[in-house]
Image (cartoon, helix red, strand yellow):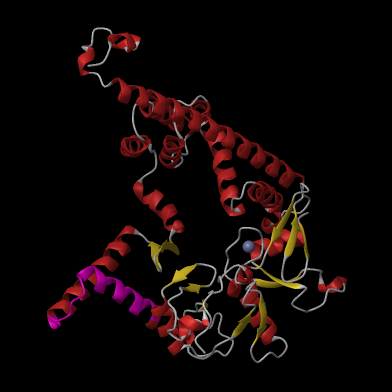
Amino acid sequence: MHSNSFAPADTVGVDMADVDVAARDLAVRFAEASRVVARAQAVQARVLADAADLGMRRVAELASSSSREAELPVRALAAELGVAANMSDRTVQRRMNDAAVLAEAFPATFDAWDEGRVSAGHVAVIMEHGLPLTDVEARAEFEAAALARAEGTTPGRLGSTLARLAESLQPRTLTERHQEARASRGACVRDIGDGMAEFISTQPAVLAHAMHDRITQQAHAIKKADPTDTRTVDQIRADLVADMLLTTTPCVETDAGLSDGVGGLGAIRGIVNVTVPALALAGVTDEPAELVGRCPIDPATARALAGHATGWDRVLADPITGCVLAVDRYTPSADMKRFLRARDQHCRFPGCRQPAHRCDRDHTLDYALGGETSTCNLACLCKRHHTLKGETAWTVRQLGGGVLEWTSPGGHVYIDKPPSAIRFTPNTDPPPF
Ligand SMILES: [Zn+2]
C-alpha cells in the first residue's frame, strides 16, 4: 500500500491503493526527458537550417550557374559540420536540406518541435505526408490538423492518419502523381550484419508485385519438381533473384561502358573486392574476411570466391601495424592502382566509405603543380570528395605511410589513417609453419 502523502495533485479522487506511484513517477520523468531530447534535436535542426541558409546564400553569390558547381558551397559546409560531429557529410547535407524544407514549408511544426511538443519522429511523418501537397493552402490546413493529432499519439499511428488526410487534401490525381513518383525508382544495397545485406529495388507497384509473383511461381515449380529440395520457398526466391540478376542478359542492348565492344550488357559481370587473411584462406584460422569497405563476410564464402577468382593481388602487410608494405608482381601503373586499392580500400575523405574501385586516384599535390605520380602523393577519393578537394577551400596533405591530414575551410584539422593499417589485428599465436 502506498502512502497518499506522495500522491500528485491530479490524482485527487483516485483510490491511491490502485496507483503504482513508482511507475507513475518513472513515466513522468521519461516524458520530461523525451521532451528535453526533442527540444535538443530541434536546436540541432535549427543549426542545420542556418547552415543550409548560409550555403544557399553563397550559391546565389556564385557567378557560374553550372549545376555541379552550384552545389559546392553547400557541400563544403556540410563537410565542415559533418566532420566536426563525426557524421557523414552526405547525411549532414541531407539533414540540412530537410531542416531548410521544414523551416520553409512547416514553420508551425518546427515551433512545436522547439517547444518539445512533438518529436523528431512526428516531424518526419508530417513532412513525409505533407510535402506531396504542393498547394500552399492545402498544406497549411494539413499542418494544423496534423499538429493537433500529433500531440496525443505515436509517430506510427500518426502516419496512417496523415496518409488518409493528405490523400483527401490532394488536388492532383493519382495518375499525375504516379508519373512523378516513377522518377524515384532505383536499387540499392544495405548491409545488415552477419555477412548479409539487403538488395532493395524501388519499382512501380505493378512491376514489383509481378516480379515477386514470378519468382514465387518459379519457386513453387522448383519445389514440385524436386520434393527433396529442403530450401524454403523464400530461400528459393532469393536464390532465383541472385541467379537471374547475376547471369541473365537484359533485353536492352548497348555498348555503354564496354571498351572492347564485345558481348553487350550480358557480358558485364558484378565486381566485388574481398580481403582475406592468408591463414583464413588456407583454412588454418576462422578470422572473418572483408567485403572491402563494406562489411565482414564469413571465411567459407571468401574461400569459395577465391577458388573462382580470375586474379589475385597478394598484399604483404606489416604484421604489427598492418600497414601495406607491397603488392606482388609490382610493375608501374597497374600495380600502383592495386597498391592504392589495397592501402586505401575506400575514399579517404574522413568518414566516407565509397569503395576504392569506384574512386578516382587523386594527386594530393596536383600533378600540374609538380606533384609526383607515386603512392605517397596519390589517394583514393570518390567523385564527390575529389570535387570537394579540388573546388572548395578544403585542403589535404600526406604525412607519410598513407596518412592524410585534412583541413576544413573553418580551420579544423582531421587525420585520416589508411584502413589497411587498422584492419586485421595480428594473431599472437605463431604461424603453424
Ligand atoms: Zn568520398
Residue 251 appears in the rendering: no
- Front position in the image: 343 or 394: 343
- Front position in the image: 150 or 42: 42
Q: Residue furthest right?
A: 370
In percent of the image, x 45 and y 73: which residue is there? 288
- Front position in the image: 280 or 146: 280
Indicate the quadrant of ligand 1 in the picture: bottom right
Q: Is residue 119 left or right of residue 80?
A: left
Which x, y percent locates residue 129?
Answer: 40, 40
Which x, y percent locates residue 157?
Answer: 31, 36
Relative height, residue 126 to residue 218 (above, below): above
Quadrant for the N terminus, please: top left
Q: Is residue 50 left or right of residue 58?
A: left
Magenta region, residue range? 225-246
Which x, y percent locates residue 226?
Answer: 14, 83
Asked if residue 233 lies in the magenta stretch, the reply is: yes
Magenta region's main secondary structure? helix
- Front position in the image: 120 or 427: 427
Which x, y percent locates residue 267?
Answer: 46, 86
The count of marks equals: 0
In percent of the image, x 46 and y 86: which residue is there? 282
Relative height, residue 381 to residue 44 (above, below): below
Q: Is residue 255 left or right of residue 16?
A: right
Residue 7 placement: quadrant = top left
Residue 61 placement: quadrant = top right
Relative height, residue 56 to residue 284 (above, below): above
Residue 173 placement: quadrant = top left
Asked if residue 397 lies in the magenta stretch, the reply is: no
